Structure formats: structure tokens, C-alpha cells
């Protein structure tokens, strides 16, 4: 059994942007899938609740969930290439989705689609095209338009720019950021890329080995991290805007979640690790206003 | 680093025919590499930067000999290594090796690491088992896989991406190359493992005097490692110079846009200002600057009619743009 997530408590307010930062295997996508209710069939949520407007999503029936999933909570998937069929025109597919899932007529559906394409800055000419004819950036814009189709309250963007070139990545993220502001969306951005999260999110949860390692306002996390993993991760990233210094290597590899290390999951890679770290998992402790970290020795390492 | 070119490309071109119509007649070409002249100096890390589709990987493949050039030459140690197979000097060509992007694809999944690495020695007619084992252990230690005994008997899928990329660098080094092409060596790796590979490449340059051509889309990695950087756009080198010059004093509008699009790590920094829009189209049109349709400084009847060539602005800094001529 893989324990993909372990005691994760996060809060997202209306109109707020939350970044889930983590490497592969950290549990960030599992968390998103759990919120969407689209975990693979062998996954079990053993404990906890997912509250959406004070409703526990885990208690809802499939039918009740369908009034929320994709409508109130929408997902921008990671691999946009496989999100739409390559053999049907984009317009036909989008109309079908709205006809079958919401019961709109073709005319109403088209109207709605055109409105959302406009928000994502796409011309409605693409409706006659096939998905593979679009560039990576345009495909991602279609995904954004689709996620907005039912005027959701929460949008979850799972690695929204992986595989895109730098300039296009910037365009897409700027779009996402301004939509979040203008539509007062609650946005969750999942990424392994520190700079993507720093640019798009006001609040960050750093995940490692299925646990939240640090949680707080992004200004705090990126400027004044109180966690060994986060601060090493930031130092291992060559920053083009500051002078060349030798970047820090984090020794070892991310944990194998089939057989995670005892105690703190980061201890085998942590330069500060002591005996206590090998035996006891540290709790999430408060280190500032809305700022939490998981480390036994936060005072010793980062001062008071 | 001295200015002694180990590798040169001379007006190197690689066109891929695009066939159209019922009879699949070749009407146009995708000019993936379109007249590239490079001098790579002994002992440097040379960063070749560009977005997907700019031809940087194709250029790497032509240099290493995985693709035949359409025209032009690749010179290595003063001798031509491109061209028809009968004339090739295999001993010379063996000195050029490539590290690939995805280590899981460049290892045979059914071979243990030891056997995969032994292939590199067998290719050099090393037969003695003990000698092989010793050489492989030493090399694994050299790339930071210690203790080697723990790595030997594992299969590729049992290693993490970072460990396997290190093993693939070890395999490359066992062939005793003097020139290595590293094609996006860190883009498949997790953030916490990336730094280790970058520092390893840096050490190989500084301690083993290897010459490395780093192909990447990541400007910050290129700046961290490279002595010189060339920026490629749709088959052409648009700017080349010392890494600090290109990063701190970019001249080409495309380089400027690339740098401006890099997101800052500080959430309080100002919104970047990026002037260009759109995405690159494959290089089909041979006339004019490749970048003119996206360029904010586009000059009509100049940029769309003439093709700007690289010219030197300063010592160690050249640009292909009419703005500076």
C-alpha cells in the first residue's frame, strides 16, 4: 500500500490563489484528484474530509458530486494533448459536452463556448479545427476556456505549463493570473516549478512525501522559508536575476512511497538531521502569522 | 579555456522535405538547421539555447553524426567528420558522445546497469572482467553514485531519474570522449535532483577538461554552466557571446523576450515586460529574418526582404539583427 497523502489540512478562501509545490511523488496531484473526486478506483480515502462551502464532498453521492465536479470545481488537466479527441472538430466536442452534461441546446452551447473562448483570448475559428492543429499554447487556452465553461468557483490547474516554451508559459500564466483576479476565482496551481508558483499564487503549500512541509503566504515562503526542504529547494534553483553562485545540491532522491523513511520523510536527505528526526515525525508548527512548518529543529536552524 | 576550436561547423544545413499533394511532391523544406557557423573551444561549456522546434536538437544530432547534413561541414580537431560513411574516421568520431534527455529511454530496460556500462568498454575491446569491473566502479564513483556495488546489479527502473542520468553520464565517459553533447540533461528530472547534474557537468569541465555542448531551453541553467551562449531561433543562430554578455546585455529582440519571460523567484518582484506575442512557426520561408513576424521592432522592406547575418558588435558578442547594423 502506498500512503500517498498523510494528514493534509489546507484552506482556500474565495478569490484566493493557492500553490501546491512538490516533486513527483509528493502527493500534489493525488490531492487535486481527491478534491475532484477522480482518484483511481484502487485509492481509498482513509480519513479526513474535503469541505466545499461547508459541504463534505466525501459524503456526497455520485449524482450529487456530478453537480459540483467540473461545474463548481473545474480542472485544467496536465496533459492537454490527450484531453480532446484528435479526430473530431473542437467545436463538435465542446458542444457535445455541454449538450450531454448540462442539457443546453446546440445554439445555447455555441454561444457559451464562444463567450468563454473570448475570455481565454481565442478566436472562434478554432472551433472548426482539430485539436492537434493547435500549438501548445493554444491547446492550453482551450483547456482554460473549457474549465471556465460552467462558471466554476474553484479552478485547479495541474502543471498548467509543463512542456510549454518559456515565452508561451509566461503568456499562459499571466492569463491565468488575470482571470483569477477578474473573475474572483479561487485558484489552485499544482507545479514542481518554484517560479510558476511564486508568480501565480499568494499562498503556498510545499508538499514532500505526502505531507505538507511548509504552508503560508508565498512572500514568507520564498523570502523567509523556515523549512530545510523548502530552503534547499530554493537554493538548488539557478536564479538568472542574481550573481552566479554555486547552487546547492540536495543529496539522495525523493522517497520511495512504497517504503518511506521512518520519522521525518526528509531526514535521509536533510543536512541538519539528528536522532530525533529518524524516529519521530515532526508536527506542523506555527512560526508566524499563517505560516507553518514541519521541522523539529526550526528554532536551531532558522533562529527564533 | 583557450580559444582553440575543438569543433567547428561551417555553413551547416539540415532540411527536412515537406511533401504535399496526391503525388507527395516535395514543395517546401523545413529548414531545421539553416547555415550555422559555430566554433566551440576546447575546455568550455557551450550553451545552445532555444525553444522547442528551433533546431537545437537537430544541430546536436548532425554534429554527433546521427543525422547527415544537407550541406555544410562539421570539423572536429581540424578534420571533417560529416560526409559519406566510407571516408569517416570512426576513432575520431568516437571522441564525440551524446547524453540524452530521458535516461529511461537511453538504457536497455532488461540490462542491469553493470551490463549496460560494460557495453561501452566492450566497444573499446576491453575484455578482462576485473579490469571492466574496476573501471566501471571508478567511473560510477566519479559521477557520484556511491557505493557502486549498490548500483551494479540494479535495473534502470530501480534507479531514480537523477541516479540513472548519472549512470548515463558514466556510460558516456567510459567511452573516453573529449567532446560531449548534453541534450536537455535535466529537463526530465525533479527539481531537487537537477542541481546535482548541473554541478556534475561543471566538475567534468573543470577537472576532466571536457568540452561540453549543453543544449537546453533553460536560460538559467545555461547561464549557470556555460562560458558562452548561442541563442537559436528557427534554424539560425540569432545571438552568440560570452554567457554574461548575452544574459546581462542581450541585443536580439528574441533574446530579450526570452529573458523577460523568465519568471522571478520572488513573489514581490515586478510584472515582467514581454513585448512579443505568438509562437514560432516552422522555418519554411527562406527570405527575411526568421523572427520578423513576432518582432516589436519590425522594419518593413528590410527585415522581411533581407536575411540578417551574424556580425560582431563587441569582442565576444555577435548578433543577427538589423537594429545594430
Image: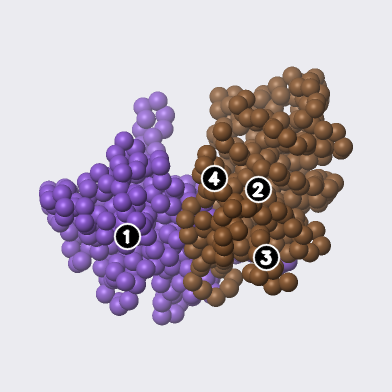
* Mark 1 → mark 4, Cα distance in angstroms: 26 Å
Residue A251 placement (x, y as % from top left): 48, 59
* Mark 3 → mark 2, Cα distance in angstroms: 17 Å
Residue B1 placement (x, y as % from top left): 32, 76
Q: Which residue position holds label 1? A: B141
Q: Do marks 1 and 2 share a chain?
A: no
Q: Is disc 1 placed on a helix, strand or loop?
A: helix
Determine the colour of chain B.
purple
When asked about the image quadrant of residue B141, the answer is bottom left
Q: Which mark is residue A211?
A: 2
Q: Is disc 3 placed on a helix, strand or loop?
A: helix
| Pair 3/2: label in front | 3
Determine the colour of chain A.
brown
* Mark 3 → mark 4, Cα distance in angstroms: 22 Å
**Residue sitting at x 52%, y 58%:** A269
When asked about the image quadrant of residue B48, the answer is bottom left
| Pair 4/2: label in front | 4
Q: Is disc 2 placed on a helix, strand or loop?
A: strand
Q: Is residue A35 left or right of residue B286?
A: right
Residue B288 placement (x, y as % from top left): 47, 57
Q: Chain of mark 3?
A: A
**Residue sitting at x 40%, y 42%:** B158
Of all residues, the one furthest to the right in this rendering is A54
Amino acid at each position: 500500500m502506498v500512503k500517498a497523502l498523510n494528514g493534509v489540512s489546507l484552506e482556500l478562501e474565495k478569490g484566493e490563489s493557492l500553490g501546491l509545490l512538490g516533486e513527483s511523488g509528493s502527493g500534489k496531484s493525488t490531492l487535486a484528484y481527491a478534491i475532484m473526486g477522480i482518484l483511481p478506483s484502487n485509492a481509498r480515502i482513509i480519513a479526513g474530509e474535503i469541505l466545499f462551502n461547508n459541504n463534505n464532498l466525501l459524503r456526497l453521492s455520485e449524482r450529487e458530486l456530478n453537480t459540483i465536479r467540473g461545474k463548481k470545481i473545474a480542472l485544467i488537466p496536465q496533459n492537454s494533448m490527450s484531453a480532446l479527441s484528435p479526430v473530431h472538430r473542437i467545436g463538435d466536442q465542446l458542444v457535445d459536452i455541454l449538450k450531454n452534461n448540462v442539457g443546453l441546446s446546440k445554439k445555447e452551447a455555441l454561444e457559451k463556448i464562444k463567450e468563454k473562448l473570448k475570455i481565454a483570448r481565442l478566436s472562434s475559428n478554432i472551433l472548426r479545427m482539430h485539436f492537434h492543429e493547435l500549438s501548445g499554447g493554444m491547446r492550453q487556452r482551450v483547456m482554460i476556456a473549457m474549465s471556465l465553461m460552467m462558471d466554476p468557483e474553484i479552478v485547479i490547474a495541474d502543471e498548467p505549463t509543463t512542456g510549454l516554451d518559456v515565452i508561451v508559459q509566461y503568456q499562459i500564466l499571466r492569463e491565468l493570473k488575470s482571470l483569477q483576479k477578474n473573475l474572483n476565482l479561487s485558484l489552485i496551481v499544482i507545479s514542481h516549478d518554484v517560479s510558476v508558483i511564486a508568480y501565480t499564487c499568494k499562498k503556498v503549500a510545499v508538499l514532500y512525501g505526502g505531507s505538507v512541509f511548509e504552508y503560508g503566504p508565498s512572500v514568507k515562503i520564498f523570502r523567509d522559508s523556515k523549512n530545510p526542504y523548502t530552503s534547499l529547494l530554493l537554493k538548488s534553483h539557478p536564479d538568472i536575476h542574481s550573481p552566479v553562485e554555486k547552487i546547492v545540491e540536495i543529496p539522495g532522491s525523493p522517497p520511495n512511497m512504497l517504503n518511506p523513511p521512518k520519522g521525518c520523510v526528509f531526514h535521509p536527505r536533510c543536512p541538519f538531521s539528528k536522532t530525533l528526526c529518524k524516529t519521530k515525525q515532526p508536527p506542523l508548527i506555527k512560526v508566524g502569522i499563517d505560516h507553518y512548518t514541519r521541522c523539529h529543529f526550526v528554532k536551531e536552524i532558522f533562529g527564533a | 579555456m583557450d580559444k582553440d576550436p575543438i569543433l567547428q561547423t561551417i555553413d551547416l544545413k539540415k532540411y527536412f522535405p515537406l511533401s504535399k499533394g496526391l503525388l507527395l511532391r516535395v514543395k517546401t523544406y523545413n529548414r531545421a538547421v539553416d547555415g550555422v557557423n559555430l566554433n566551440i573551444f576546447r575546455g568550455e561549456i557551450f550553451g545552445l539555447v532555444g525553444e522547442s522546434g528551433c533546431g537545437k536538437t537537430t544541430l546536436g544530432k548532425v554534429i554527433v553524426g546521427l543525422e547527415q547534413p544537407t550541406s555544410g561541414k562539421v570539423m572536429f580537431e581540424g578534420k571533417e567528420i560529416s560526409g559519406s560513411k566510407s571516408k569517416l574516421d570512426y576513432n575520431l568520431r568516437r571522441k564525440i558522445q551524446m547524453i540524452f534527455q530521458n535516461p529511461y529511454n537511453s538504457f536497455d530496460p532488461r540490462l542491469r546497469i553493470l551490463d549496460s556500462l560494460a557495453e561501452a568498454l566492450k566497444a573499446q575491446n576491453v575484455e578482462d572482467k576485473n579490469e571492466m569491473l574496476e573501471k566501471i566502479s571508478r567511473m560510477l564513483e566519479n559521477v557520484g553514485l556511491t557505493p557502486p556495488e549498490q548500483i551494479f546489479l540494479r535495473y534502470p527502473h530501480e534507479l531514480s531519474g537523477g541516479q540513472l542520468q548519472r549512470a548515463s553520464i558514466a556510460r558516456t565517459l567510459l567511452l573516453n570522449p573529449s567532446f560531449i553533447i548534453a541534450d536537455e540533461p535535466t529537463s526530465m528530472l525533479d527539481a531537487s535532483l537537477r542541481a546535482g547534474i548541473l554541478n556534475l557537468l561543471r566538475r567534468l569541465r573543470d577537472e576532466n577538461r571536457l568540452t561540453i555542448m549543453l543544449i537546453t531551453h533553460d536560460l538559467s541553467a545555461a547561464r549557470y554552466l556555460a562560458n558562452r551562449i548561442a541563442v537559436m531561433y528557427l534554424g539560425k543562430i540569432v545571438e552568440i557571446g560570452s554567457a554574461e554578455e548575452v544574459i546581462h546585455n542581450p541585443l536580439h529582440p528574441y533574446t530579450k523576450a526570452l529573458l523577460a519571460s523568465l519568471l522571478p523567484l520572488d513573489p514581490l518582484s515586478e510584472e515582467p515586460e514581454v513585448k512579443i506575442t505568438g509562437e514560432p512557426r516552422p522555418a519554411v520561408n527562406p527570405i527575411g529574418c526568421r523572427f520578423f513576424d513576432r518582432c516589436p521592432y519590425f522594419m518593413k522592406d528590410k527585415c522581411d526582404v533581407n536575411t540578417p547575418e551574424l556580425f560582431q558588435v563587441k569582442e565576444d558578442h555577435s548578433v543577427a539583427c538589423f537594429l545594430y547594423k
